[in-house]
Image: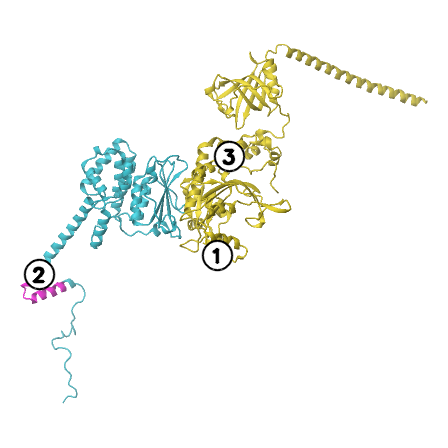
Chain colours: A cyan, B yellow
Amino acid sequence: MSMYQVKPVCGSLLKPDLPTCMYTLPNIHGQQGNSCTSDLCSEHALQNGEVDPAVKALEARQDEILRKLYELKAAVDGLAKTVTTPDADLDLTVSSSLSSQSPSSTTFTGVTNLDTLLGKDLGALRDIVINANPAQPPLTLLVLHSVLCQRYRVLSTVHVHSSVSNVPPQLLSCLGPRHADSYARQMFQLGFTLIWKDVPKLQMKFSVQNMCPIEGEANVARFLFKLMSPYPSDAALATLVDSWVDMAFFQLAEGSAKERAAVLRALNSALGRSPWLAGQEFSLADMACYCCVLQSGPASSTPSNVQRWLKSCENLGHFSPAKPFLQ
Amino acid sequence: MTKDEVQGAMEEDQAQSKKGLKKQQKEAEKAVKKAEKQAKLAADQQGSEEDDFAKDRYGVPPMVQSQQKLDRVLVRVEDLSPEKADQLIWLRARVHTSRAKGKQCFLVLRQQQFNVQALVAVGDRASKQMVKFAANITKESIVDVEASVRKVEQKIESCTQQDVELHIERIFVISQSEARLPLQLEDAVRPDGEGEEEGRATVNQDTKLDNRVIDLRTTTSQAIFRLQSGVCKLFRDTLTNKGFVEIQTPKIISAASEGGANVFTVSYFKTSAYLAQSPQLYKQMCICADFDKVFCVGPVFRAEDSNTHRHLTEFVGLDIEMAFSYHYHEVIDSITDTMVQIFKGLRDNFQTEILTVNKQYPSEPFKFLEPTLRLEYTEALAMLHQAGVEMGDEEDLSTPNEKLLGRLVKEKYDTDFYVLDKYPLAVRPFYTMPDPNNAKYSNSYDMFMRGEEILSGAQRVHDAQLLTERAMHHQIDLEKIKSYIDSFRYGAPPTWRRRHWPGESVHAVPRPPQHSSDLHVPT
């Protein structure tokens, strides 16, 4: 007679494979997929096998639909950028807030930190000083300025240097109306001081101790653009943007008629392949080329792709500050 | 007499006669020379008396006693240009230099800032005697000259009128000058460095002051005074156009206005009075009397014993006072605009004078921005910190730091004139209005030219209660300022005050310290 009856804990199904193996255990490494699918399969298999193809088909359909949806989304975004009204920014921000997972995000986003770019905040206004010759107003910088104003609180001022005696009134108001809070400089994140001066080349000064002056509209444009959003992380794309910017300032704006014609042809062929010069997104390349194309000559001789692209740029609404100087 | 004595006497006689002989010989030689000289003179005179066909074309005419009113037009030296070529003109100027060379005499005739080369040459219009006369005219004499204007192929570098010279036909000395002058004008205008380098003389400041009349004739002095006049005129015109009223305030007052230390006392009949240190009190009275905008140009007296180029016992003050509506920046904008108009006026209309002064006192051209640059104290601190200066947030700027800041601002913005706004409250007087958003700072500012402070201003507290609080905070005896606080009890408009040191406004052009003619700077 037994003292305490205890039920058997483990089943008697396990048959030790003596003398080599006492306990067999399933292999826990690798082939997990197989094990999953095998589970599924086994599940499916468990479920009579009839639902198996249906579920598969369902899944396939789901994938297909999702893929089409993504494609549509991309197409619509692209279209939106080319066809929208001057309230583009509003539309884009609205649409971007609705689609949190959109792969093609709005223009000029990306993480930028003023402190890393401009140096530690010492509790005072960080003022960027640009010396420009009134004979050659820097349109690209005016456009960049208006975009900067949307991103940050910018205190903009225009001065006339004593080396210049007379400046047309539209150059004095090119940065827009004076901000209501301009008496309190500390309240702004960034200062944009434009000085009309008799300089041979456009010049930018920021931190006299740590930075040498930056010369040339192309370089200042790059600096200002990077305050808003970083260059594309893909090195090839970034180089493409840079090369377009250089082409715009050196060959379109300052080049001979032959060089200009060559650039226009290059623009035409590039714009035949993608809506914008650097692919799917509006970038500094488009900004610079737009300003230089319109500054350099009449629009009659521009090829068709370029004309279409010019209209798209205008529809974006960023270029309104440059308009008064292009007529 | 002994034989020896006789012999001695005979020897003496002989010696005497030898000496006598020598003496006689010498006298004879002298007489011969004298006779020769006299003969020569006589010959010269004879020579001069013969053939002086130009006798009536030069000389010293009788003193101008208004004998007759000539309708003669005297041309100004500054108007002599190639346009007047071949014209016969009269002009009156001073002889700056005269140099004879054989049959010609070159003169430089000077009038205020301008001079021109003139030539007397022996020919059919001028005789030898006339050329000699011209060469002997003493410097600084005033002459009347009739001459024809001739163009020159090569520019005359040493004169202001470089394209023409005068060929003199008649020359008369109206007022002769003594031969020996206490100082030479060329030396007085020579830049200090050049004098040392080439071993040429420059004139000591004391000598200049002792002979101020001559020193003021130099081109540099003429230019400086014209610039000063221009600054005052531009100041007046700009403010009048903005609707300001010019007032004249009392200079003999009954109580020291700024604080007793730096005031001059004058005896006033049976008691004493003081020379006004600034028109501040009267300007404020005008504002409280609804004048709205006033300015005042007049002397200011400070008994300051400092001997720097920024401290004078008597100087001309350009003072402004205005009421503002909502923000003290309205006032800053008004002042900076006035300054910019003055700078522009000097730049556009007084280039000749500026260049003249630059010859003796070289300097960089003055640069400014329109509208004027306004930086906040925090920005200045950031710039100084970056340059390695250690100073606290609420510390005042020392003079070397002000100069360094001026250089930093010049490097970044390329301007010599700017406003520094929002000074820390701790370094300003008790009557300064605190900043509404940040109690550490105040509504006060300074203006700088070439790194030197030229103007200080602030919004004043116009509320009696706040004034009392601030005074107590600064541990000031309320009894002493009771009348000041009381003056705000009768509806004082928001007011602000600004003090301008005008000696510095002419720092647009560096100049030697200004002295009145009979007052020397105390040592």
Where disc 2 sits, the SS reads helix
Where disc 3 sits, the SS reads helix
Which image quadrant: the C terminus of chain B? top right
B296 in the magenta segment: no
Q: Which amino acid does label 1 sit on?
A: Arg
C-alpha gap between disc 2 and disc 3: 99 Å
State the residue position of label 3: B229
Q: Viewer-nearest of labels 1 and 2? A: 1
Which image quadrant: the N terminus of chain B? top right
A40 in the magenta segment: yes
Q: Which residue is drawn at 13% across and 77% down?
A: A11
Picture disc at residue A55: 2
Picture disc at residue B470: 1
Q: How crowded is mark 3: few (under 14 residues within 10 Å), some or many (20 or more)?
A: few
Q: Which amino acid does label 3 sit on?
A: Ser
Q: Residues within 10 Å of mark 2 (few under 14, many from 20)?
A: few
Q: What stretch is highlighted in magenta?
A: A34-58
Give whichever of B26, A133 is nearer the camera.
Answer: A133
**Magenta stretch: dominant secondary structure:** helix
Chain letter of disc 1 in the image: B
